[in-house]
Image: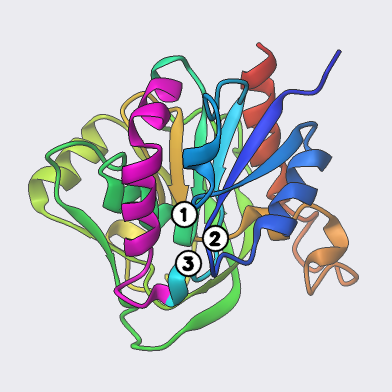
């Protein structure tokens, strides 16, 4: 059986696309990389995609704010096509800068709701490993991850904020997909590390699961001081399982 296709959306400045390709292939996908500047030349982009992933990094150097220009490019080149893919049941994942892009596009947390990813509460760029927990939610990507995940973060604008109405909606609709289990690194409201859309198909998260798909990638892997590694690979495998269902 041919492996399902995961399309990786990139822009100038994104730098995790190679990591994503490796991780997605390990999870059982075949991959293609689509530069946002060239999507307009493609015929029926995403037609064959079984999953769509927006890569992390520093798109357009975050010159006008994290993810803003990448989101504007996608809005022009792909917004309707991306929405059509979601309506067809294609799962979408935005990691770090990709999460920021999906929020700016209005795909997360939902049309008409007010949310943003602001500067870290510390005022500093945070680069460290974090432990995540996956509360009960409608998110397909985090289904069954009862042990949580261990992932690195690397961001300066990852503090999830929203108004009280949006927060109540996210909680009621079970759209909070991931929380920092301890030591919230950026001051996100409710320790939020990732949220999904109302369908559960679209997930945005700040940590990088693609950088923990092999146990030895964890800095403490040889010490095993806290049980077995909680691999980000499990999250990506959920995407593949959905794609072949």
Which residue is labeled 3 in the image? Answer: 59
Q: Is residue 38 visible?
A: yes
Q: Residues within 10 Å of mark 1 (few under 14, many from 20)?
A: many
Q: CA distance from mark 1 to mark 3?
A: 9 Å
Quadrant of the image occupied by residue 168: top left
In-image side of 44 versus 29 (left or right) = left
| 239 drawn magenta | no
Which residue is labeled 1 in the image? Answer: 98
Q: Which mark is residue 152?
A: none
Where disc 2 sits, the SS reads: loop
Question: What colouring method underlies this structural image?
Answer: rainbow
Count of marks placed on residues = 3
Q: Residue at x 77, y 56 (%)?
A: 229
Of badges 1 and 3, nearer the viewer stands 3
Q: CA distance from mark 2 to mark 3?
A: 8 Å
Q: Is residue 185 visible?
A: no
Q: Which residues are magenta?
A: 62-86
Which residue is labeled 2 in the image? Answer: 56
Q: Position of residue 209 (x, y in %)?
A: 64, 54
Q: Are marks 1 and 3 in contact (CB under 8 Å)?
A: no
In-image side of 47 versus 177 (left or right) = right
> In the rendered image of this protein, does residue 105 appear above or below residue 12?
above
**Outermost residue, front direction?**
41
Q: Residues within 10 Å of mark 2 (few under 14, many from 20)?
A: many
Q: In the picture, which quadrant includes the N terminus?
A: top right
**Secondary structure mostly taken by the magenta-highlighted segment of the chain:** helix
Q: Position of residue 31 (x, y in %)?
A: 73, 38
- Which mark is first along the chain, 3 or 1? 3
């Amino acid at each position: 059986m041919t492996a399902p296709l995961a399309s990786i959306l990139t822009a100038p400045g994104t730098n995790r696309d190679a990591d994503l390709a490796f991780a997605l292939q390990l999870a059982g996908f075949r991959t293609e990389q689509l530069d946002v500047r060239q999507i307009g030349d493609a015929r029926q982009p995403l037609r064959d995609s079984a999953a769509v992933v927006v890569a992390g990094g520093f798109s357009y150097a975050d010159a006008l704010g994290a993810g803003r220009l990448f989101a504007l490019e996608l809005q022009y080149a792909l917004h309707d096509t991306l929405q059509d893919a979601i309506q067809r049941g294609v799962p979408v994942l935005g990691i770090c800068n990709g999460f920021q892009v999906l929020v700016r596009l209005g795909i997360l947390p939902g049309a008409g709701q007010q949310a943003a990813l602001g500067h870290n509460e510390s005022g500093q760029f945070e680069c460290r490993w974090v432990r995540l927990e996956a509360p009960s939610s409608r998110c397909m990507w985090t289904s069954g991850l009862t042990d949580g995940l261990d992932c690195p973060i690397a961001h300066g604008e990852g503090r999830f904020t929203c108004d009280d109405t949006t927060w109540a909606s996210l909680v009621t609709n079970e759209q909070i997909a991931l929380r920092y289990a301890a030591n919230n690194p950026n001051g996100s409201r409710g320790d939020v590390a990732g949220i999904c859309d109302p369908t559960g198909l679209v997930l945005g998260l700040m940590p990088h699961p693609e950088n923990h798909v092999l146990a030895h990638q964890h800095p403490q892997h040889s010490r095993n001081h806290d049980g077995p590694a909680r691999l980000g690979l499990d999250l990506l495998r959920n995407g593949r399982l959905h794609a072949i269902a």
